[in-house]
Amino acid sequence: MPAVGAVRQVALSAGRDLDSTLAFWREVLGMNVHARFDPPGIAFIMAGAVRLLFTDGIPAGTVYLDITGLEAFHAGAKAAGVPFTAPPALVHRDTEGQFGPAGESEWMAFLKDPAGNTIGLVERHPAQEPSE
């Protein structure tokens, strides 16, 4: 049996208004539309090598995106009126290096786009040097 490779595409809800959903991803997250097809009213945004497909008729989903400068992004977006469902918080200290270098900590914040998709913003912080 062949082995499954990397994630190629993730489908997310476009909600009732594809334009407002795409505007959120562009204006708040700084991600540009890669391709759009009307009809049928679908769009793609590239998140690295993974395509995000926005279409109607599917339930809202959750996607996690790497970010650098999570605290600064949160402060700026919140000041601009972007509602977060959870502020930046430590979610995991990777003491054994299971998901990256040992000792790193993983911080996340959560928000929703106009279609109801949950966006988890993830930042890994290097291990702290022991104080002397």
Image (cartoon, rainbow, N blue to C red):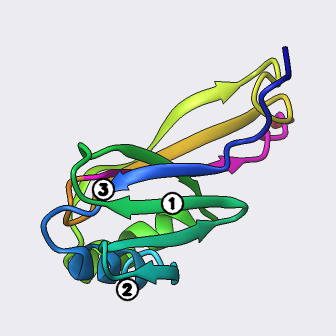
Mark 1 vs mark 3, foreground winner is 1
Answer with left or right where residue 46 lies relative to residue 91: right
Q: Residue at x 70, y 64 (%)?
A: 48
Find the distance from the CA under tag 1 to the CA under tag 3.
17 Å
Q: In terms of depth relative to the viewer, which is nearer, 98 or 6?
A: 6
Q: Is there any visible trace of residue 121 in the rendered image?
A: no
Q: Residues within 10 Å of mark 3 (few under 14, many from 20)?
A: some
Answer with left or right where residue 50 lies relative to residue 98: left
Q: Which residue is mark 3?
A: 111
124 in magenta: yes
Q: In terms of depth relative to the viewer, which is nearer, 30 or 8?
A: 8
Give the extent of the magenta segment: 117-130
- Secondary element type, mark 1: strand
Q: Which residue is mark 2?
A: 27
Mark 2 vs mark 1, foreground winner is 1
x%, y% of residue 113?
26, 63
Answer with left or right where residue 6 lies relative to residue 78: right
Indicate which disc, 2 or 1, sits on the residue closer to the N terminus: 2
Find the distance from the CA under tag 2 to the CA under tag 3.
14 Å
Q: Quadrant of the C terminus?
A: top right
Which numbered tag is attached to residue 52? Answer: 1
Q: Which residue type does callout 3 highlight?
A: Leu
Up the image or down, 112 lies above or below 107; here it is: below
Q: Which residue type does callout 2 highlight?
A: Glu
Instruction: List the single residue furthest toward the top.
Output: 1
